[in-house]
Amino acid sequence: MCGSHSGNCSMFGAFNLRDEQTIPSFKHAFDAFCGHLKSEGYVHSWRVWERAHHEGYDARFPEVEVLVEMCFHDHQASLHCWNYVDGGSEPMKALHVAVNRQVKDAIFALYHQRA
């Protein structure tokens, strides 16, 4: 679970899936992407959320169907992870492309908890 780890820092992404893409196919690609980042020591966990529509809760939130969370060991790990992904070396490049080709309308933000 993301919130139970010390040094909480998470990247949240909100987006829609492209036509013909499904939550299971996206989750498979995202699990491979995050699993590699975990093996490299950047993240400790991740989650994929599918929107549960509710009139009261949906006020002013973007019209997106999927929310992901990548949970880093700490803020510094998130910065190193960005550089690693942005570097575009294999196998990260192929894993990142496999995730990105399934999404549209994406927005991302990095958050951390204050002590």
Image (spheres, rainbow, N blue to C red):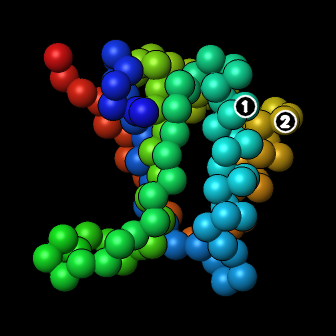
Q: Residues within 10 Å of mark 2 (few under 14, many from 20)?
A: few
Report the amino acid beneath label 2. Pro
Location of residue 60 in the rendering, given as x and y in whole percent from the top left corner: 19, 73
Q: CA distance from mark 2 to mark 1?
A: 9 Å
Residue in the image at 59% along x and 73% along y: 17
Q: Residues within 10 Å of mark 1 (few under 14, many from 20)?
A: some
Report the amino acid beneath label 1. His
Residue behind mark 1: 36
Q: Viewer-proximal residue, 95 or 38?
A: 38
* Residue 78 appears anywhere in the view: no
Question: In this image, 95 relative to 30: left or right?
Answer: right
Residue in the image at 72% along x and 82% along y: 20
Residue in the image at 53% along x and 25% along y: 44
Say above or below: 68 vs 36. below
Image quadrant occupied by the N terminus: top left
* Number of numbered discs: 2
Location of residue 38 in the rendering, given as x and y in whole percent from the top left corner: 64, 26
Question: In this image, 54 relative to 14: left or right?
Answer: left
Residue behind mark 2: 91
Q: Viewer-proximal residue, 50 or 64?
A: 50
Regarding mark 2 in the picture, which secondary structure is present there?
Answer: loop
